[in-house]
Amino acid sequence: MGQSMRINLQVWRQRNEKAQGQFETYNVETNPDMSFLEMFDVLNEQLIEEGKEPVAFDHDCREGICGMCSMVINGRPHGPKQGITTCQLHMRSFQNGDTIVVEPWRANAFPVVKDLSVNRSAFDRIISAGGFVSVNTGNAVDANSVLISKEVADEAFEAATCIGCGACVSACKNASAMLFVGAKVSQLSMLPQGQPERETRVVAMVNQMDAEGFGACTNTGACAAECPKQIPLSVIANLNREFYKAKLNGK
């Protein structure tokens, strides 16, 4: 294990969605080899020993796969490193004695559940609005029966790497979900399996996105810059093309 280091934390504490939150300051002894979430585990053990309520935060896989570990760290979703989630951030990215400010995602469409945990079910409803894919997938031996060029397959796979963590929304000054929706729409619109519902899907998902209260995209690029899976801005351009094409066709 690395050398011990002491960190000053300013953590957002909020009892529920309706309560008024505030920052509270904590002192934590950690080491450079700990992940950011492990450091929070140490903090919570410390709080429990002191008879205080631990900090609520989301986590699951702790392997950068699920996107649950949603924290804004010193003003940046998932922290100072690019292309990683909070659980992949290690304390060696900070210096002994640093003060670290930790907040939840900030968006009206992501109401705070408690402390650093927010409700991201708006994303689930957008996905549900997209509906199903009416295609016979066949058996494993049929996998190569529909030919897809490598260029298209690579671009679709790149969009499919979106884990729906919401960092794009948190980074955007308008709390826009266009990068997320663009990734999900692009993933299917590029592949032959996604063609039957292609136009109705994009209109339904965009309408649901607007209904959830996400803001508009003004092309600042903050979403792509902070995305842990580095989804490119091109998916937003593709989303706009798909949407306007569908509307022109009366969908």
Image: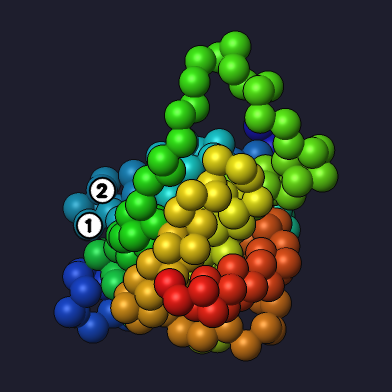
| Direction from residue 53 to residue 64 in the image, left or right | right
* Residue most extreme to the top: 141
**Above or below: residue 168 compared with residue 64:** below
Of the 4 image quadrants, the one containing the C terminus is bottom left
SS under mark 1: loop
**Above or below: residue 42 compared with residue 116:** above
**Amino acid residing under circle 2:** Ile
Could you classify mark 2 by the number of other residues whose Cα lies within 10 Å: few (under 14), some (14-19), or many (20 or more)? few
Any part of residue 201 in sight = yes
Residue 30 is marked as none
- Given residues 49 and 223, the one toward you in this image is 223
Residue 49 on image: x %, y %: 26, 46
Any part of residue 98 in sight = no
**Above or below: residue 231 compared with residue 154:** below
Residue 212 on image: x %, y %: 33, 75
| Direction from residue 80 to residue 166 in the image, left or right | left
Residue 52 is marked as 1
Residue beneath disc 2: 48
SS under mark 2: helix
Write the residue at 22% across / 57% down. 52
Write the residue at 51% across / 15% down. 139
- Badges 2 and 1: C-beta atoms under 8 Å apart? yes
**Amino acid residing under circle 1:** Lys
Could you classify mark 1 by the number of other residues whose Cα lies within 10 Å: few (under 14), some (14-19), or many (20 or more)? few
Image quadrant in which you'd find residue 197: bottom left
- Given residues 82 and 165, the one toward you in this image is 165
| Direction from residue 163 to residue 114 in the image, left or right | left
